[in-house]
Amino acid sequence: MVTFNKILVPRDATKSSDRALEYAVKIASDNRECEIILMHVIPSFPTLIPSSKQGKIKSASQSYLHDVYEELESNADKILAGLKLNWSRDSDVPIHTHVVIGGNVAQQIVGYAKKHEGI
């Protein structure tokens, strides 16, 4: 039987990622040395935004972008904390959360896994 030390579970707001977390908890429950890293990536998005002046487009300010990303990070942290609490209550599996802001989602996930080789 294959054993794992860590399982990285990237999460978006889909049922598939919920099922992936459920499956990861099941695998980790069978191995007392295993932990789960529940990860969410907030992708970069265009800095051009519509203006209220007849369909014109303007560049978003750094302050505006900072506020948007801060709000998205706060929401992601709350969602992951809730999932962690729910699953930790039902199992003895240690679950850690990690939110990444910006960049390409796939590249951020792969980069995290490579940086933390035990995953």
Image: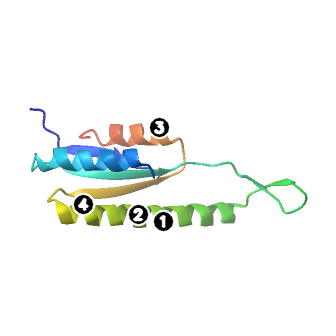
Based on the displayed image, in which of its 4 quarters is residue 113 positioned? top left
Three-letter amino acid code at the position of disc 2:
Ile
Q: Dot 2 surroundings within 10 Å: few (below 14), some, or many (20 or more)?
A: some
> Disc 1 vs disc 4: Cβ atoms closer than 8 Å?
no
Mark 3 or mark 2, which is nearer to you? 2
> Disc 3 vs disc 2: Cβ atoms closer than 8 Å?
no
Q: Which quadrant is the N terminus positioned in?
A: top left
Q: Dot 1 surroundings within 10 Å: few (below 14), some, or many (20 or more)?
A: few
Residue 42's x, y, as percent?
A: 51, 52
Q: Residue at x 53, y 41 (%)?
A: 104
Q: Cα distance, mark 2 to mark 1? A: 6 Å
Q: Earlier in the sequence, mark 2 or mark 4?
A: 2
Q: Cα distance, mark 3 to mark 4? A: 27 Å
Mark 1 or mark 4, which is nearer to you? 4
Q: Cα distance, mark 2 to mark 4? A: 12 Å
Q: Which mark is residue 107?
A: 3
Residue 8's x, y, as percent?
A: 30, 45
Q: Which residue is mark 2?
A: 79
Q: Residue at x 34, y 65 (%)?
A: 81
Q: Which residue is mark 1?
A: 75
> Disc 2 vs disc 1: Cβ atoms closer than 8 Å?
yes
Three-letter amino acid code at the position of disc 4:
Trp
Nearest to the observer: residue 47 or residue 62: 47
Q: Earlier in the sequence, mark 3 or mark 4?
A: 4
Q: Earlier in the sequence, mark 3 or mark 2?
A: 2
Q: Dot 4 surroundings within 10 Å: few (below 14), some, or many (20 or more)?
A: some
Three-letter amino acid code at the position of disc 1:
Asn
Q: Which mark is residue 87?
A: 4
